[in-house]
Amino acid sequence: MQKEILEEHPDSDVRVYVVWFNMLSGDSRSGWDECVMSDPRANHLWDEKRLTSRAFAGEVEGAAAPVWDAYLLYDPEATWDDAPTTPISSGYTVYGAREELEKNIVPLLE
C-alpha cells in the first residue's frame, strides 16, 4: 500500500490509521514495525484490548472475527459521530485485497 498508493500520490490529503494489537505469538507493542507503514500521513495506534477488531468485524468483506490485517476505506466526506459510517471499500488481507483497495482509493487521491 505504501509504495503502490501513498508514494505515488505524495501530495494527496489522505489519512491512514494503522491499528496494532497482539494477534500472533510474538506480537507486542514494543515489537510493532512502523517501517511497514512509514509514510508521515500514517498514524500508528496500539489497541491492547483489540476493540477495533470487534468493532469492525462486520464491516470487512471476506473477514471473520477477530479481524486483523484488513483495511477499511472511507469517503473523504465521511464523518464519525456515535459510530463510523459504512466504508466504501474493505478487504482482508491488506496484501490480498491490494488491487481492490488501489482501484477504490486512487480516484479519491487524484
Image: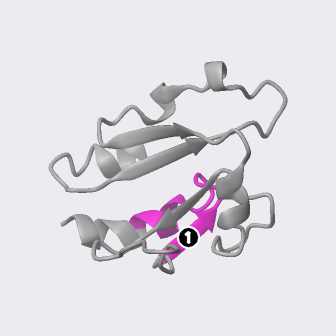
The quarter in which the C terminus is drawn is bottom left
Percent from the top left, x then y, of residue 64? 80, 67
The residue drawn where x is 74% and y is 67% is 63
- Residue 93 in magenta? yes
The residue drawn where x is 30% and y is 43% is 41
Q: Give the left or right position of residue 81, taking residue 13 as reference.
A: right
Magenta region, residue range? 89-102
Looking at the image, the residue that sits furthest to the left is 11
The residue drawn where x is 50% and y is 74% is 82
Q: Give the left or right position of residue 103, taking residue 31 as reference.
A: left
Residue under circle 1? 90
Q: Is residue 42 above or below residue 89?
A: above
The residue drawn where x is 36% and y is 74% is 79
Percent from the top left, x then y, of residue 87? 49, 76
- Residue 86 in magenta? no
Q: Is residue 47 above or below residue 52?
A: above
Q: Is residue 3 above or below residue 26?
A: below
